[in-house]
Amino acid sequence: MPAPIRPNPASRHTKPKSTNKTGKEWKSILFGGKNFRFSGEYHSGGPGVAGRGGWHTGADLAIAGGTNIQAPMSGKVVSAGWGAGGGSAFGNAVLIKLDNGDYMYFAHLSKIGVKKGQKINVGTYIGKVGSTGNSSGNHLHLEIRRASSGGGWQRVSSNFYDPVAYLNRNASNQRVTSDKTDPGVSTSPGSFGSDRESSSPSGGSTSEEVVDSGGMGMGKTGFSKKEFYKDLNDMFGDVKILLDLDKSAMEKSPGKSIQWAINQAIKQKIVDPDRFRTLLKQTSWFKTYGEQTTRNLIEEKLQPGLFSQNVAGIRSSIEERAAALGLELDAKRLDDLARNAYVFGWSASSSEVLDRIQTAMSEGGATVSGGELGAAEDQIDQWAWDFGVDVSDSDYRQLHQEYLQTGDIQNTKNLLQERAAQRYSVFADQIRNGTNLRSLIDPYLQSAAQLLELDPEQLDMNDSLFTAGRAFQTSDPGSGKIVQRTLADFEKMVRKDTRWQYTMNARKSASDTAMGILQTMGLM
């Protein structure tokens, strides 16, 4: 067995030596003899690219969407489906256990053509090239894994190999024994890219690059209007849908149309994809949406099943994020938000998604029930109690906005603190310095509760005795300035409250007063 190739951290940003000089046989088998390009190499790139620890665990092979994929080695399907064998980032995927015990992984497929448990021969149809999951454009992400000593094949417990070098050693000269290829014609959006996270200085390409489609249009020395439109279909999936979308957009916001760009390209006989992109970028449509969003919108019309599947993935992520926040979004808003997030490339925690969640909350389309926002509301309620102020609906809205934007609620605390300082001016300096108002007024609350024979919890700052600080602040007769009311003066005020006369304390006080008068008069 070959020893695993391990990454060298010291050379993360250096381009690996090419291993693509041999192995023509397996390359011919993989895509039925069609040309492809390596858009992301094994372990290429630096921190932040796909794979464990910032390393790219496979190779990216760029080719038109919808191209048939055929097995270069024989084995048996271990798993097949959305995120199979690697997680949702890999979209539609197939994992095969090879006859030699290793594993081969095919990811980002637009269509899967095999089932779990199926026997695979060299040349067996696996599926079609696509751009599902975290992908910048149509390509095949290919991995070779070897099970750990514990026997696990999952990504977290596997050893990875350079798939190109591996196939050059193990798949070359293998004989095609089965050719169950799907004759279907490619209809998927034809951008060419790599794993979305991979943007390597060592040569990995992005969706900005285009591979010749084999016609006489863009990228060729000749020119043909028919082939030109064919190349546009390869780039975006369906030019007619693109023009229909552009026409609707132009009715709302006039400017340079995509048809204008096409006419200019035909008139100037442009065969260079980069020159054509220069024209496209001048149109109102691409200034607003760009290429990836354009491909997603065309996918919505052209491949509604695939589009719905991709939207379902982002919907699940948004639902999980909302649940963590403690939010319940109504189904229609969640569906609309997921669709827009997928189309425009927003992540579940992006500001665009959070802004729309906030709008839903303000319009009653979302409710808070626990989670991070529920905990934040509990905290603001505690601060309001400590500061002796009320929390309004606008305070809660500010709290939600602040937390969704920054993850912090300090500004809301400062707002309540300043409101308390202005309401209870006699304690203003102490409140602004961080002293808990409750600790300052607790003697007044306890005294009132004792005299009125009430539970202290029944008294709050909205009680008539305490409204606007009546209990503990008054005017100095001499200067007219606000001063602190003494506890003795406060107790006199309590005895004027209508609740006082119904207490045992009041009856005892009256009795004591009567006895004192009788004693003074010598009658006792």
Image (cartoon, rainbow, N blue to C red):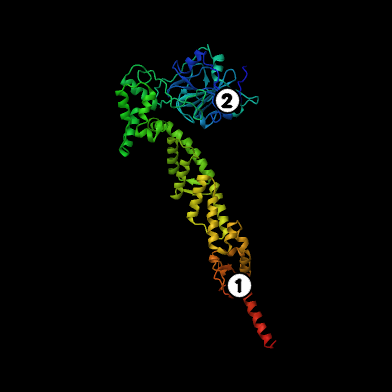
Could you say where residue 295 lies in the image, as x and y percent from the top left? 40, 30
Local crowd at mark 2 within 10 Å, few (<14), some, or many (≥20)?
Answer: some
Local crowd at mark 1 within 10 Å, few (<14), some, or many (≥20)?
Answer: few
The three-letter code of the residue at mark 2 reads: Arg
Could you say where residue 192 lies in the image, as x and y percent from the top left? 44, 25
Q: Residue at x 38, y 34 (%)?
A: 287
Residue 248 falls in image quadrant: top left
Furthest-bottom residue in view? 522
Q: Which residue is mark 1?
A: 489
Q: Earlier in the sequence, mark 1 or mark 2?
A: 2
Could you say where residue 194 lies in the image, as x and y percent from the top left? 48, 26
Could you say where residue 126 lies in the image, as x and y percent from the top left? 48, 22
Residue 421 falls in image quadrant: bottom right
Q: Secondary structure at mark 2?
A: loop
Q: Quadrant of the N terminus?
A: top right
C-alpha distance separating marks 1 and 2:
77 Å
**Does 421 appear above or below 464?**
above
Q: Which residue is mark 2?
A: 12
The three-letter code of the residue at mark 1 reads: Asp
Q: Is residue 471 left or right of residue 227?
A: right
Q: Quadrant of the C terminus?
A: bottom right
